Image (cartoon, grey):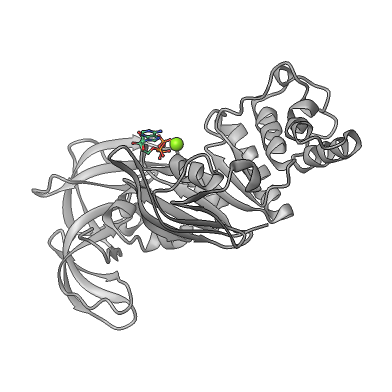
């Protein structure tokens, strides 16, 4: 197993910065998810770590050994880094065992040793007994596990996943998620896992790296990202946080601030040591919005979406243009065009509102 240290890495394609000054320190055995909008540089980051691309600036160190800098690019096969892509591309004419053992055959590992390691890899992904099948006779999830076994057979110290579940249906995704979690628990392999699925990232990862336009914006635990987003981008990207302009009126002790938002005063959480009063941006979650009596904020309902057991209400306050949303439990209902009153019970003062 090995940790991964990415320091000040920049990657340009022509004059386009696909990655700008990215630093990421992943501990030995950690499970890190990478989240971010399409085109933000996630795959590029993995390709650099695997050695398929060379960095323009910065360094990449795996297990204490420097693998990449502008003058050095240790070839992929010498990095002990395994990679599993979204389209797992198994060879259709080979059996499962042949697929898994192919890299060992190329490396001229002798037959007995090869067979032993193939069996071991198939056991790790719970596919013992499937060695003689062809990929065509496997389910999507089983094929994905063969791809994982093929990566594990060379005993990588670090495994990179690029959206490995994107092609699978919802049920299969859930059971594969369990497989990945138990694989990680069993082996303690360091894992970097790219996904578009936030719930998946939250469920699996020790820490999540959020990227935007080639920059690393925040690297924190799932809970911290949700409760204390560092920027408006993270606030709105993670779990559809609502970002509103606000005024910080006073900074209290123990990480609380009195703010004015949507014309009302409320006590929000803020970073301890937050010294700034005045204009700010805040993140409000659906769960922070509660129905209120007559002195609440008046909102008019734009849309009510039934969600089973309750509805998600989309509404706007007064003259605002920006929508807010909250959940309304059955049997209460609100129809489009109705007005109602809400209170904002809590929220978070975004520390880096200007980035
Ligand atoms: N070989 C290349 N040559 C030129 N531009 C590239 C190359 N590879 C990637 N890019 C550009 O770099 C940016 C980042 O691409 P990347 O594939 O890393 O995004 P991503 O975050 O993985 O996106 P997605 O979620 O859609 O997979 C994109 O704008 C892409 O067009
Ligand atoms: Mg990608």
Residue drawn at the location 46% of the way across and 40% of the way down: 43
The N terminus, quarter of image: bottom right
Q: Position of residue 337 (x, y in %)?
A: 17, 37
Locate residue 298 relative to residue 307 in the image: left or right. left
Question: Residue 295, can we see it?
Answer: no
Is the residue 202 above or below the residue 176 in the image? below
Is the residue 188 above or below the residue 237 in the image? below
Give the total number of marks visible in the rendering: 0
Identify the image quadrant of residue 231.
bottom left
Q: Nearer the viewer, residue 305 or 155?
A: 155
> Residue reaching furthest right?
112
Q: Which of 64 and 215 is in front in this view?
A: 64
> Residue reaching furthest bottom?
253
Q: Position of residue 275 (x, y in %)?
A: 22, 78
Locate residue 67 relative to residue 109 in the image: left or right. left
Residue drawn at the location 33% of the way across and 53% of the way down: 234
Q: Position of residue 321 (x, y in %)?
A: 13, 44
Q: Position of residue 352 (x, y in %)?
A: 26, 64
Q: Quadrant of ligand 1?
A: top left
> Residue reaching furthest left?
319
């Amino acid at each position: 197993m090995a940790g991964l240290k990415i320091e000040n890495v920049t990657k340009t394609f022509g004059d386009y910065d696909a990655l700008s000054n990215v630093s990421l320190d992943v501990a030995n055995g950690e499970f890190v998810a990478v989240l971010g909008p399409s085109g933000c540089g996630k795959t590029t980051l993995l390709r650099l770590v695997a050695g398929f691309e060379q960095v323009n600036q910065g360094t990449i160190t795996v297990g204490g050994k420097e693998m990449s800098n502008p003058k050095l690019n240790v070839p992929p096969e010498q990095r002990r880094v395994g990679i599993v892509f979204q389209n797992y591309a198994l060879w259709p004419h080979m059996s499962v065992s042949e697929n898994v053992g192919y890299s060992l055959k190329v490396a001229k590992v002798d037959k007995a040793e090869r067979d032993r390691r193939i069996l071991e890899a198939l056991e790790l992904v719970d596919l013992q007994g499937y060695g003689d099948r062809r990929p065509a006779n496997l389910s999507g999830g089983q094929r994905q596990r063969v791809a994982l076994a093929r990566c594990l057979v060379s005993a990588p110290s670090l495994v990179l996943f690029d959206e490995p579940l994107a092609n699978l249906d919802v049920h299969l995704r859930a059971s594969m998620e369990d497989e990945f979690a138990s694989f990680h628990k069993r082996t303690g392999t360091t894992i970097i896992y790219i996904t578009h699925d936030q719930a998946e990232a939250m469920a699996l990862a020790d820490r999540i790296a959020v990227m935007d336009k080639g920059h690393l914006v925040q690297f924190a635990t799932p809970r911290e990202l949700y409760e204390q987003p560092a920027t408006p981008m993270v606030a709105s990207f993670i779990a559809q946080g609502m970002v509103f302009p606000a005024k910080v009126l006073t900074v209290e002790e123990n990480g609380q601030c009195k703010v004015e938002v949507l014309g009302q005063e409320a006590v929000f959480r803020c970073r301890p040591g937050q010294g700034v009063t005045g204009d700010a941006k805040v993140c409000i979650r659906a769960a922070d919005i509660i129905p209120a009596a007559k002195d609440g904020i008046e909102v008019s309902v734009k849309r009510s979406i039934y969600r089973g057991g309750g509805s998600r209400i989309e509404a706007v306050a007064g003259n605002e243009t920006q929508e807010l949303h909250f959940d309304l439990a059955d049997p209460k209902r609100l129809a489009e065009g109705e007005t109602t009153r809400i209170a904002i019970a809590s929220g978070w003062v975004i520390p880096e509102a200007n980035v």
